[in-house]
Image: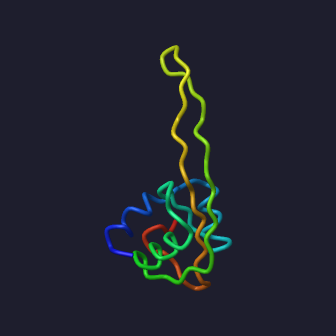
Amino acid sequence: MNNERLYQVIRFPHISEKTARLQADSNQYVFEVRKDATKTEIRQAVEGLFEVNVEGVRVVNVKGKRKSFRFRTGRQKDWKKAYVRVRAGQVIEDLQAD
């Protein structure tokens, strides 16, 4: 996979209380990824960009919420979330919660 595709697969990290707990307890990181990304592409992108060894990747398709915008009902976009488990003893320094 070329470098341009690596940067396109992972859009940005998903930061929340749950993801901070996952980082501390089970060495997992959560990313928002492209909707057409596969597990192997996500694995290659994380290993290539952050220089860690990935043990497993789980993918969740998140449905967009229904919202009302100025008296009109609308819907937010659907998106894809990837839970990435890295090998024990390895960390992604940029995403460490303090």
Does 77 sit left or right of 50 as displayed?
Answer: right
Residue 45, picture quadrant: bottom left
**Which residue is farthest right?**
25
Q: Nearest the camera: 90 or 75?
A: 75
What is the x, y in percent for residue 54?
56, 79
Q: Residue at x 47, y 67 (%)?
A: 95
**Which colouring convention does the figure follow?**
rainbow
Q: Residue at x 34, y 74 (%)?
A: 2
**Which residue is farthest top?**
71
**Which residue is farthest left?**
4
Q: Residue at x 60, y 60 (%)?
A: 19
What is the x, y in percent for residue 27?
62, 74
Residue 82, picture quadrant: bottom right
Q: Up-down: is 61 above or below 66? A: below
What is the x, y in percent for residue 33?
49, 58
Does 33 sit left or right of 4 as displayed?
Answer: right
The image quadrant where one finds the N terminus is: bottom left
Q: Up-down: is 3 above or below 73? A: below
What is the x, y in percent for residue 96?
50, 69
Q: Residue at x 62, y 61 (%)?
A: 59
Q: Nearest the camera: 17 or 73?
A: 73
Number of marks: 0
Q: Up-down: is 89 above or below 14? A: below
